Amino acid sequence: MEMTCAICLERVRNPTFCEPCFHAFCYSCLRSWFSTLKISQKTCSTCPLCKAEVSGIVYSVKSERNYKRRNVSNFIGDKKKVVASFDKSDVLETTSLFDAEPSFLTDQHVFRRLVYAQRLWVQPLPSSLYYQSRREGDVFCEADPKLIQWIRRDLQALLGLEDVEVLVNYIYGKIEEGSSREDLKKILEPFLFENTSHFLHELFQFASSRYGLEDYDQVARYVRQQDSASHLSS
């Protein structure tokens, strides 16, 4: 699945992300956006899509452990001819999930790996909160065919494997049976280890939304959690 830039409405070229919402845009489009805000003397830099205040820019993303981060003022001042030159303070270090990057990964897979590596937890959408308030019992979420695509993509990103269909079908089958969060956690921990709770949080928020995968990725916003154990969905 290709990412679409909300500024030029074309396929994202050189994906560049606003922090903390992590919406993606073309590198050149985003620089133009922030340059325009600077010229108009706006007091803060905001995301072109959700209007959240932007604290930093993540770009030149090669993998979840190989990318650059700059503050907005330095990002606007960057020139293409010197884009490969960075101060150490501008580079955001992260931990590695894998020793090598599988060749089948798309831009979306790389972004999802970044989400898990940086402990970026998606925030509930208003429609999701309404759904969650009406949920009854211990059932994790309602079965919906749209979940299959999400589960497949994130398992591929986390496991570094292209063929994950057996596990996808098993997880979705358990959701159809009405399994609880704890049931799913026990099933997934041997595969996802410390990423299990994060995976379930992301899955639950997507399941609670009214969006399909592509539209959801466009509106989702993230915050970095220092202690992910304290931010589990109820």
Image (spheres, rainbow, N blue to C red):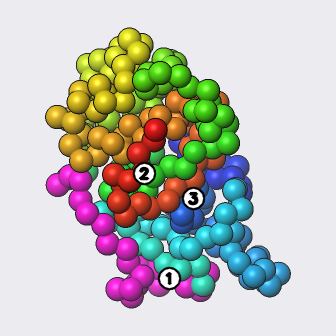
Local SS, label 1: helix
Residue at the image position 41 percent from the left and 15 percent from the top: 178
> Which label sits on residue 60?
none
Please provide the residue range marked out in magenta: 74-100
- Residue most extreme to the top: 177
**Can residue 34 be spotted in the picture?**
yes
> Mostly what secondary structure, the magenta segment?
loop
- Residue most extreme to the front: 137
> Which label sits on residue 231?
2
In the rendered image, the vertical position of residue 118 relative to residue 90, given as above or below: above
Q: What residue would you read off at disc 3?
A: 21
Which of pointers 2 and 1 lies earlier in the amino acid sequence? 1
Q: CA distance from mark 2 to mark 3?
A: 17 Å
In the rendered image, the vertical position of residue 162 relative to residue 2, given as above or below: above
Closest to the observer: 11 or 34? Answer: 34
Q: Is residue 80 magenta?
A: yes
> Which label sits on residue 81?
1
Amino acid bearing label 1? Lys
Local SS, label 2: helix
Disc 3 crowd rating (10 Å Cα; few below 14, some 14-19, many 20+) is many
Closest to the observer: 141 or 84? Answer: 141
